[in-house]
Image (cartoon, rainbow, N blue to C red):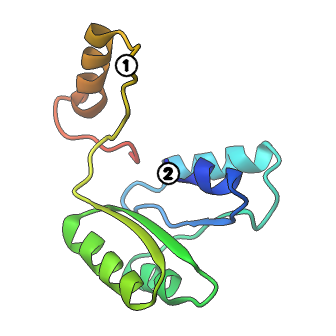
Amino acid sequence: MWTVPIALVMGNCVILKPSEKVPMTMHYTANLMKQAGVPDGVFTMIHGTKDAVQALMTHKAIQAVTFVGSSPVAKLVSNTCRELNKRCTALGGAKNHLVALEDCQVESAASDICVSFAGCAGRRCMAA
């Protein structure tokens, strides 16, 4: 999801296929984007599993793919996109990623970083 604002600001349209295990957050986000005035077709969400991913990766109009999920699927996405000469960011086994600027409050940032990935006393993903 973190690449969506970047893609939109750069003038691209986005098709989001959320995790089939936790789709409701992205469904809510899609509704908020529509309420905010994002035109139809600029941000689109589809649901599905492997077939949906395969269709997106191989569609001739799709020029770039971003994936965050398991390492085996990230490798599949990366290899498929490379074979089709498509730009690809495939983050396998990715956790919550961030950038701490040099003027941040280190103690506060360290605490917030720990809470962001382990706040539920276990693993948690930004997509959930």
Residue type at the position of mark 2 = Met
Q: Position of residue 117 (x, y in %)?
A: 26, 33
Seen in the picture, residue 51 relative to 113 is either above or below; the reply is below
Q: Local crowd at mark 1 within 10 Å, few (<14), some, or many (≥20)?
A: few
Q: Which mark is residue 63?
A: none
Q: Measuring from the top left, give residue 27's x and y in whole percent.
A: 58, 53
33 left or right of 83 in image: right
Q: Is residue 82 above or below residue 117?
A: below
Residue 45: x and y in percent read 60, 65
**Which residue has dot 1 on it?**
102
At x 69%, y 64%, the residue is: 12
Mark identifier at residue 1: 2
**Crowd tier of the residue under label 2, counting other residues whose Cα lies within 10 Å: few below 14, some 14–19, many 20 or above:** some
Q: Nearer the viewer, residue 62 or 38?
A: 62
Please tell me in which quadrant of the rendered image residue 81 appears: bottom left
Find the distance from the CA under tag 2 to the CA under tag 1.
25 Å
Q: Quadrant of residue 41?
A: bottom right
Q: Amino acid at mark 1?
A: Glu
Residue extending farthest to the left is 122
Local secondary structure at mark 2: loop
Q: Nearer the viewer, residue 37 or 89?
A: 89
